[in-house]
Amino acid sequence: MDSKSAISGTLPATLPVALSEAVLAFRSGEALLYGPTPDWGIIQLAGPDAFPFLQNRSCNDVLALINPGDSQENGVLDRGGHIQGMFTVLRVDHETLWLLSEKTQIPGILNHLKKFLLLEKVRIEELESTVVFQIQGKATAEILTRLFEETKIEAASYYTIEKSLTGEEGRFLCVPATQVSSLNHCIAGILKTLKITPLVVSENPLLVQITRIEAGIPRFGVDMNTETLLPETGLETQAVSYTKGCYLGQETIARIKTYGAVQKALMGLVFAEGCVPFPETVFTADEPLPLTDSTESDMSKVNVHLTSACFSPTLNRWIALAYLNKTTRIPGKSLEFKINNMPMSATVTMLPFFRAETRAEKAQQLLQAALKQFAGLSSENEDLLTNEVIPKLREALSLDPNLIDAYEALGAILARLDTTESYEEAITLMHQLSERDPDRIMAHTNLSVYYMKLGDKERAEEEKAKATVLAMRQKAKEAGLTLLSPEEEQRKKEAATRQRIQLFLEALQYRPEDPLGNFGLGSAYLELNEFENAIPAFQKTIAAQATHSVAYLSLGKAFEGLNQLTEAEKIYVRGIEVAAQRRDLMPLEEMQRRLKALENH
């Protein structure tokens, strides 16, 4: 990055009450951030070759965008895997793609794409007349629903992209410049009706920065640039397809995933209470700041690059995004260092610092709350059925249309009301359920009952027949799976595992130190609970490939199986360091959970 430092904001370290309260109101859902976002823009790729052209030039699978309105995170790289531009791709139609990106990136992305444009039939240009308008906050979905249902604004005239810059639910609207004023006015009116505090994007730059940093979202030109390897940022988990085929930079990205971790990676730092690393509320730097977890004399050996920092009202601490080297990017690790000769203490954490509850999680909570409330209902308070239980289930389905159990629950409760309207709604729900889960027997069983209640005997018999056919298929499938006794099934499984062990042993005669063969051998022994045999195989795997994070997890399990808990702890500690360096989240989280259980043993 540039040698100069860019500092945003001149507020004191302790946030003004109004700003702190605004951030907390936003996090609680009492406020919503919205408005035109002039620092974002749109690049359009249009023409018969738009899809194959971008497919061959970007790191994600553009061909996976099947329907108009589908979107994905994506980017373009150089041959070395360095970021040349990051963007969100929107499928507009069968030969038009829009790339949503920060304005500062657009010239670079355009130059990068156009230099590969030869005979392809595709036009690449920035859409100057289209304004990017964002809505961020817990009420985003409701705002959009009301916007398109209660106002004169037509959804068909807008392109909507799901994208969060704050950790909360977020949408970007791509709108004609002539409609921005009307859109602003309509949203302001809806917020007033809902008694939600409006926070206009252009009037709240510090709030925008604070919520971005809390969400752990790197910004181009601040937290990454054209010299940054994509895997160093963590964005590859969203923006890379490892199965799509060739693209510029693919070899580097695949090699990093397969053989090792990057030297530095973007992580979070949570400063200890009382630590004030900078005199500004929000800080962004283009110079690396030396941090160390040992002594000042070692500072020159430590490779750490602090990028964005702010005081977080949500955590009530200073936080920072920082590139940490392999020895320091271990979640939970305490770092002691100095900034401007002031002693500091911070704890390393995975990003994001803040993650909002997802729609699916909230829907599941509503479902459980509704079922619990329903179970406690008595005849004296059955009015709660229509006033609270049913609305909770409807809201759960609006948040997560794939929440299968909510369909059955709501259908059954509506049927209990025993009215024509309630049966008709229950029938609609069961049809929606059968579309999402074609093998759901209860959907057709319930439909049969509900149609019969409405006097439609013919349809009731049809649904009953469908339920019968599905039940017969399920029984046949179950019968096929249980032809053997449990003992015979176990013996068959063990024999297959023994056969795998023999194959691995034969292969290892020629390559005794092969990490793949030893890991397969150890895994097979682990399946049989033959821990003594599994341990040396996993140890050989780690000796040959020290970055094999899953091998540490498996080795720890084997030591646990022998009740060698001290050895298991040591392995998990080492494995957590490796997994953190490689950003292997599954084994990292599993080893952290197991280590904590052992420490509490």
Image (cartoon, grey):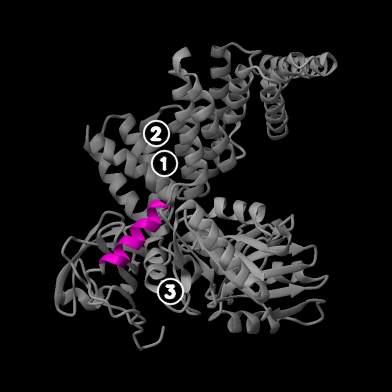
Give the mark nearer the N terminus: 1 vs 3. 3
**Looking at numbered disc 3 in the image, what kind of residue is underneath it?**
Glu
Q: Name the residue beneath numbered marker 1.
A: 537
Q: Is residue 397 left or right of residue 446?
A: left
Numbered disc 1: secondary structure: helix
Q: Is residue 323 visible?
A: yes
Q: Name the residue beneath numbered marker 2.
A: 533
**Looking at numbered disc 2 in the image, what kind of residue is underneath it?**
Asn
In the picture, which quadrant includes the N terminus?
bottom left
- Start-end of magenta stretch: 17-29
Between 75 and 182, the one lying in front of the other is 182
Numbered disc 2: secondary structure: helix
Look at the image and say whether residue 554 sits in the magenta stretch. no
The Cα–Cα distance between marks 1 and 2, rounded to whole angstroms, is 7 Å
- The mark closer to the camera, 3 or 2, is 3
Q: Residues within 10 Å of mark 3 (few under 14, many from 20)?
A: few
Q: Residues within 10 Å of mark 2 (few under 14, many from 20)?
A: some
Between 179 and 595, the one lying in front of the other is 179
Q: Name the residue beneath numbered marker 3.
A: 203
The structure residue drawn at horizontal position 40% and vertical position 36%, both measured from the top left corner, is: 534
**Looking at numbered disc 1 in the image, what kind of residue is underneath it?**
Ala
The structure residue drawn at horizontal position 59% and vertical position 26%, both measured from the top left corner, is: 410
From the top left corner, tell me how far across and down residue 448 is, in percent.
75, 16
From the top left corner, tell me how far across and down residue 15 is, in percent.
26, 68
1 and 2 marks in contact (CB < 8 Å): yes
Outermost residue, right side: 458
From the top left corner, tell me how far across and down residue 572 is, in percent.
31, 45
